[in-house]
Image (cartoon, rainbow, N blue to C red):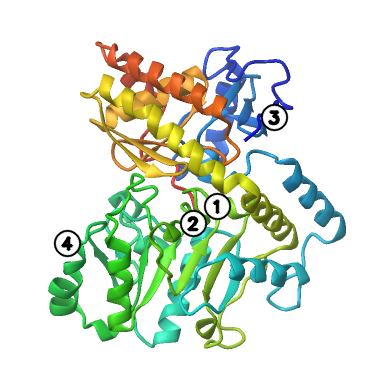
Amino acid sequence: MAHTPSRLAGGRPVPDIVTEIPGPRARAHVEFDELWTSRSLPRAYPLVPVRGDGLVVEDIDGNLFLDFAAGIAVTSTGHSHPAVVGAIKEQAAELIHFSASDWYLPIYAQVCERLAAITPIKGGRARAYLGNSGAEVVEASIKLARHATGRQNVVAFLGAFHGRTYGAVSLTASKAKYHAGFGPLLPGVHHAPFGTEASLRWFDEVLFEKLVPATEVAAIIVEPIQGEGGYVVPDDAFLPGLRELCDRHGILLIADEIQTGAGRTGTMWAVDLWDVKPDILLSAKGIASGMPLGAMVARADLLEHWGAGAHGSTYGGNPVACAAALATIELLESGLIENARVRGEQARAGLRPIADRYPALLRDIRGRGLMIGVEFDSPETADAVQWACFQAGLLVLGAGKSAVRMSPALTVTVDEMATALRIFEASLAEVAGDREGQLVEMAASAGTHSGGGAGR
């Protein structure tokens, strides 16, 4: 993509750190925040952002950061893309809210039509339902699957993250802490091993033979590439095999594309990488460039099966978020998806020699498009690298047990990618030379942790 100078940075380089990190105003705000907000928020590190433009984020102290976290893979078109901001302003001046649950909101149906047109659903004919978040549409998919099939059991995967609301967290199996203290969780949920063709045998050999018959399984929900679980890419035979298993037993296949979708993997949806068509596909995060919107796109016959009042939302598919979604989809189809593919190739090509130079610390590089996971030898190393990047002005985010993810906006340029790779290697070199473990200690004392910031 052509480089567009940042309106926020002006003539300043990016990153540009002008105070210690965190700066004095950031430290003061963290103290204020900790007096008033829920302690349940995980907080990856003490960044206090106040403005953003493209991949540039300015914090409360005036420091400029290069953002390769994108608000947990949300700001797909970059921070405050002019086309998205323009669509938001135009819609907000006309109508901010009217519930599509009780009335016929035009832009709601327009978004549903666009999503149905760009989503690969089995059978071809699709409809859509809009909510406010990823977790909301995960919940909607559980209800729809059980209602449409008359079956009660749902299967998710070990390592999966589907959200923190009750049904969604029951499906989540990336960390035990998400379940701790909240039982009993949703009944009828089972967890399968993820990612290999061999692991699919678990369904016939364990689940269907020893736990529940296939005829009582409503759906299997899968992230095509696991997100918060560590950016884990399955074997090429895995998703096609899962589709065949579902077809054989009349089970609905739900693709959770909340993090993988909206062009992030270099295709509109990650399932496109394996030419798999689910019965239900879930989207959120990047589909509206940061505005709160979740979408459940499903076979039309499934969404025609339940009647009025079976599901709805006061705010879901609000006009302003819908306007952002329409602008986002247009941008994605106008070159951002291809840019994600090309810049992702640049990232992995740049990371491979770094891995060769630090084989004791960097164990794996994986991902597709701009969904890039770097696995380290330990959680402590991952935390220290994340902290060193933050100190140097590069925002990355932990994933899984000992990985760091890079998930920049799809607008990232060749120069921004090169800058990020340079800082990332310098940060890794700093960690490698940290014989006394000071970076690990600093990261731990600041609350940095590789599994932070899942977010739904």
- Judging by the rendered image, the residue that carries numbered circle 1 is 285
Q: Reading the chain from its start, which is encountered first: label 4 or label 1?
A: 4
Distance from disc 4 to disc 3, alpha carbons, whole Å, reads: 47 Å
- Judging by the rendered image, the residue that carries numbered circle 3 is 4
Whether 287 is drawn above or below 421: the answer is: below
Label pair 2/1, CB-CB below 8 angstroms = yes
Residue lying at 56% horizontally and 24% vertically, measured from the top left: 415
Task: Judge the density around disc 3: few (<14), some (14-19), many (≥20) Cα neighbours within 10 Å.
Answer: few
Disc on res. 258: 2
Report the side of 135 relative to 357 (left or right). Answer: right
Picture quadrant where residue 110 is located = bottom right
Q: Reading the chain from its start, which is encountered first: label 2 or label 3?
A: 3
Task: Judge the density around disc 4: few (<14), some (14-19), many (≥20) Cα neighbours within 10 Å.
Answer: few
Distance from disc 4 to disc 1, alpha carbons, whole Å, reads: 31 Å
- Which amino acid does the dot numbered 1 rest on? Lys
Q: Secondary structure at mark 3?
A: loop
Q: Position of residue 399 (x, y in %)?
A: 37, 41
Whether 37 is drawn above or below 284: the answer is: above
Q: In the displayed orientation, state which residue is furthest to the right.
A: 94
